[in-house]
């Protein structure tokens, strides 16, 4: 079986935090078994694919991971825990519910760890936190920072979910009429099912 290439995963979320959540897919009500972040190697590649990490940083991270496979596996596991906590936080907000306290705590912990390891870069044009080096946990920090960035943004009002799968996205359509993560995937599948239903009827 051909190995999946993370570079082929569509970035349809409209924000890195949602693209992070969307590295696990499946039907909206489950099962959620379409996993893209199968190990640390795929995680590092996805960070570059999503724009959260420069391409030049991937090789140093992978070299560090190969030298300390136990820590790389630990970071990978922690990142999956973070991903599901972020998903549940956004899903709760989408349905106007209070996010679970334990999931907020997971996100807050990762964010605090991220800020403790960041350098603040200040200029007249742009100010932001910067992570450098080959620290393996960098793969955890940047998605946590992205999630907080979206939670504090007015763009959160555009949060929506595909009617067919679990993927989340920002609906930037003028009248907020977007139904699918993408027409190439769930949208076309829904059209096929609707056509079959009409023929049976």
Image (tube, rainbow, N blue to C red):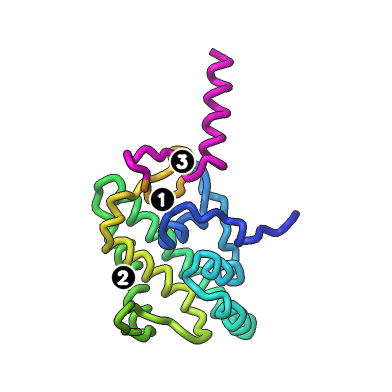
Per the image, label 3 sits on a secondary structure element best described as: loop
Numbered circles on residues, count:
3
In the figure, is residue 100 to the left or right of 139? left
In this orientation, which residue lies closer to the viewer: 83 or 121?
121
Residue 146 image offset from top left, x and y in percent: 38, 67
Which quarter of the rendering shows the N terminus?
A: bottom right
Pointer 3 and pointer 1: residues touching (CB < 8 Å)?
A: no
Q: Position of residue 131 (x, y in %)?
A: 43, 82
Q: Which residue is painted at 32% across and 49% down in the image?
A: 158
N-terminal-most mark, 1 or 2: 2
Q: Main secondary structure of the magenta part?
A: helix
**Cα gap from disc 3 to disc 2, whole angstroms:** 30 Å
Which residue is tagged 3? 180
Crowding around mark 1 (Cα neighbors within 10 Å: few <14, some 14 to 19, many 20+) is: many
Q: Nearer the viewer, residue 9 or 78?
A: 9
Question: Relative to the observer, which residue lies in front, 89 or 186?
Answer: 186
Q: Position of residue 197 (x, y in %)?
A: 54, 20
Calculate the distance from the C-alpha at mark 3 to the C-alpha at mark 1. Answer: 9 Å
Q: Is residue 168 above or below residue 164?
A: below
| Residue pictured at 32% horizontal, 66% vertical | 149
* 76 magenta-colored: no
Decide which of tag 3 and tag 2 comes sooner along the chain.
Answer: 2
Bounds of the magenta segment? 173-201
Residue 181, placed above or below residue 131: above
- Residue at 74%, 56% (x, y): give it: 2
Label 3 vs label 2, nearer the camera: 3
The residue labelled by disc 2 is 108
Q: List the residue tagged with mark 1.
A: 169
The reply, left or right, for residue 170 in relation to residue 191 is left
Give residue 147's quadrant in the image: bottom left
Residue 156 located left or right of residue 134 = left
Q: Residue at x 30, y 67 (%)?
A: 105
């Amino acid at each position: 079986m051909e190995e999946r290439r993370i570079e082929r995963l569509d970035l349809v979320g409209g924000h890195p935090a949602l693209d992070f959540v969307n590295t696990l897919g499946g039907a909206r009500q489950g099962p959620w078994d379409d996993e893209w972040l199968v190990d640390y190697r795929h995680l590092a590649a996805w960070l570059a694919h999503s724009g959260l990490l420069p391409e030049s940083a991937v090789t140093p991270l992978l070299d560090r991971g190969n030298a300390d496979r136990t820590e790389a596996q630990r970071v990978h596991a922690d990142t999956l825990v973070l991903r599901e906590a972020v998903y549940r936080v956004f899903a709760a907000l989408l349905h106007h519910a209070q996010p679970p306290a334990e999931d907020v705590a997971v996100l807050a912990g990762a964010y605090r760890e991220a800020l403790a390891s960041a350098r603040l870069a200040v200029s007249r044009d742009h100010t932001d936190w910067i992570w450098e080096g080959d620290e393996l946990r960098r793969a955890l920090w940047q998605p946590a920072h992205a999630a907080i960035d979206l939670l504090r943004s007015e763009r959160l009002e555009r949060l929506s979910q595909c009617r067919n799968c679990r993927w989340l996205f920002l609906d930037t359509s003028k009248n907020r009429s977007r139904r699918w993560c993408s027409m190439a995937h769930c949208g076309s599948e829904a059209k096929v099912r609707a056509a079959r239903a009409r023929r049976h009827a």
